[in-house]
């Protein structure tokens, strides 16, 4: 491109948004019109023009500010990356650092208009990091891309799944928390149910208002995508031993709508659900969550029999205060099965917590117990009181056991384990202020959930299926009145368009 051509192009690229901003902000309609014109101009500009440089030397990216000139910055970046033959060479190169800078600074409103290009840059960054065997390098920029676009993190997109899979590959578990800790309430909304007159740049009640099926900010969501997201998310929480966060993720998989068959993903989730409940609570719930369909519940329990058997032996041993020999035998018999399912590490941890829950359970019967009796009931070596004392001390220091070990003499046979009578006593006692603060946090979470439920109900009333049901209900009511019968008060069950992925590699 000749310098004069770039001279004519550059003002066009810098024309929107107006900078400095006008005293009177642009109306939504004018903003929408101007940014669409800019997008069209960029689509009509050849890629080699965007990478040719500026008249006085240098590159367009040296002039463009991604926080202001988001669209031109994105298009120029993609043009440079597409011109790079060796993807692995991108990492550490000049375009790589420009991409990282872009994800930290882009204007989240402007990006709503270039969903396809935005996702393309995310994929380029992921692929470049994987190509040079450095998946960790892509974790932070993609996390920034998700949370800058949608700070609430409440609308599920295809990038969510890409991100958690990348975190698993990179073993960057804690880096995934800022995304995983934000509860998902919505999926990209259908543009057909959007309020009339709302534009991508408008103020929206939720992020699903601008992350829609037409925005291209997410690829099309398949039935498997959210299931895999919650399964991978649970695996990340498991890796951090955050059992109580992993359980609802696994239950989200198990309760997913299904018509006839449990998917392989649901079967894998059930196996982990059994083990994680043993690790968190020392027992497996007597039934699956109530919203699990009967067919899914039946099939996952059938295919997860070895895990149920492990849970039954765990429970039976706890109730009868037996040592872990029978549980050890069951673990040994199923070693190949646990390994094939990639659950051996979890099963071995279940063996360890069996002893912990046995000690904890003693506190529900006794206020205090001599150490020799604790050793006799919980240790494979009933004479090794020192080892038992060390084990109990580890439990107390880690917060697993709210108790004290009285070691007034040098003789371990005289030592006494005293259990805290309530959560307000003992070394891990919680003050009234701490309890109050936890209640306030829980109330805030409940209020937020209620708000999302109301919003979901509102959107449901705008859906075509709901309107059709209302029409059908009126017809049934009229027919029932004529025939003297009671009309149906519930919508007919529509078959869920589920796919049987039992044979998939999910």
Image: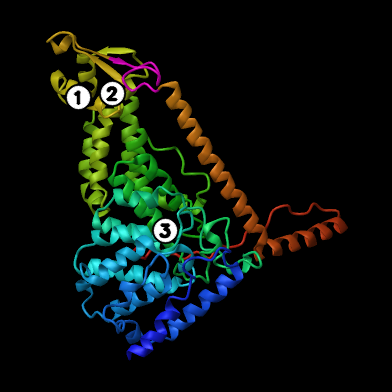
- In the image, residue 429 lies in the stretch drawn in magenta: yes
The residue pinned by badge 3 equals: 148
Please state the horizontal and vertical placement of residue 50, each as a whole percent of the image. Answer: 34, 82
Specify which label sits upstream in the sequence, 2 or 3: 3
Of the residues tagged 1 and 2, which is closer to the observer? 2
Q: Residues within 10 Å of mark 1 (few under 14, many from 20)?
A: many
Question: Which disc, if any, is residue 253?
Answer: none
In depth, the one of 413 and 111 nearer the eye is: 111
Q: Which residue: 58% across, 47% down?
A: 451
Which quarter of the figure has residue 494?
A: bottom right
Please state the horizontal and vertical placement of residue 210, each as a whole percent of the image. Answer: 53, 64
Callout 2 secondary element: helix
Q: Which residue: 55% across, 67% down?
A: 200
The residue pinned by badge 2 equals: 359
Q: Is residue 193 visible?
A: yes
Question: Which residues are drawn in magenta?
Answer: 418-430
The residue pinned by badge 1 equals: 379
Q: Is residue 304 visible?
A: no
Total numbered badges shown on the rendered structure: 3
Secondary structure character of the magenta stretch overall:
loop
Asked if disc 1 and disc 2 are in contact, CB closer than 8 Å, the reply is: no
Task: Report the side of 484 relative to 137 (left or right).
Answer: right
In depth, the one of 201 and 471 nearer the eye is: 201
Q: Residues within 10 Å of mark 3 (few under 14, many from 20)?
A: some
Please state the horizontal and vertical placement of residue 174, each as a whole percent of the image. Answer: 30, 48
């Amino acid at each position: 491109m000749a310098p004069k051509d770039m001279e004519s192009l550059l003002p066009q690229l810098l024309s929107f948004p107006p900078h400095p901003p006008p005293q009177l902000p642009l109306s939504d309609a004018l903003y929408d019109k101007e940014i669409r014109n800019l997008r069209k101009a960029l689509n009509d500009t050849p890629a080699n023009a965007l990478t040719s440089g500026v008249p006085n030397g240098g590159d367009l990216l040296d002039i463009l500010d991604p926080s202001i000139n988001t669209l031109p910055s994105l298009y120029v970046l993609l043009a440079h990356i597409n011109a790079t033959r060796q993807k692995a060479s991108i990492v550490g190169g000049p375009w790589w650092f420009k991409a990282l800078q872009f994800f930290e600074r882009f204007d989240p409103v402007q990006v709503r208009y270039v969903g396809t290009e935005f996702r393309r840059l995310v994929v380029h960054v992921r692929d470049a990091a994987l190509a040079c065997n450095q998946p960790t390098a892509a974790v932070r920029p993609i996390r920034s891309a998700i949370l800058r676009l949608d700070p609430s993190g409440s609308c599920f997109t295809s990038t969510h799944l890409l991100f958690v899979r990348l975190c698993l590959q990179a073993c960057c578990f804690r880096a995934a928390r800022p995304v995983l800790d934000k509860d998902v309430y919505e999926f990209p909304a259908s543009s057909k149910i959007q309020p009339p007159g709302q534009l991508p740049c408008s103020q929206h009640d939720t992020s699903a208002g601008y992350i829609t099926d037409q925005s291209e900010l997410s690829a099309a969501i398949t039935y498997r995508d959210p299931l895999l997201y919650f399964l991978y998310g649970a695996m990340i929480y498991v890796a951090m031993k955050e059992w109580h966060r992993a359980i609802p993720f696994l239950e989200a998989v198990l309760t997913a709508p299904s018509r006839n068959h449990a998917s392989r993903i649901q079967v894998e989730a059930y196996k982990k659900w059994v083990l994680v409940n043993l690790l968190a609570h020392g027992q497996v719930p007597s039934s699956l969550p109530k919203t699990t369909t009967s067919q899914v519940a039946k099939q996952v329990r059938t295919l997860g029999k070895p895990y149920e058997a492990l849970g039954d032996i765990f429970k039976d041993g706890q109730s009868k205060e037996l040592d872990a020999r029978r549980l050890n035998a069951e673990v040994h018999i199923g070693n190949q099965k646990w390994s094939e399912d990639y659950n051996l590490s979890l099963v071995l941890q279940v063996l360890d917590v069996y002893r912990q829950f046995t000690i904890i359970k003693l506190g529900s019967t006794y206020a205090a117990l001599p150490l020799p009796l604790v050793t006799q009931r919980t240790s494979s070596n009933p004479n090794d009181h020192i080892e038992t004392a060390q084990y109990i001390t580890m439990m107390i220091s880690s917060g697993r056991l709210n108790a004290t070990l009285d070691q007034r003499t040098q003789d371990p046979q005289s030592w006494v384990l005293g259990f805290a009578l309530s959560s307000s006593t003992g070394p891990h006692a919680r003050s009234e202020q701490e309890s109050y603060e936890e209640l306030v946090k829980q109330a805030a979470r409940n209020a937020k959930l209620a708000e999302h439920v109301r919003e979901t109900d509102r959107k449901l009333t705008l859906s075509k299926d709901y309107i059709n049901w209302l029409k059908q209900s009126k017809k049934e009511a009229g027919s029932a009145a004529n025939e003297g019968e009671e009309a149906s008060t519930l919508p007919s069950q529509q078959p869920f368009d589920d796919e049987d992925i039992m044979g998939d590699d999910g």
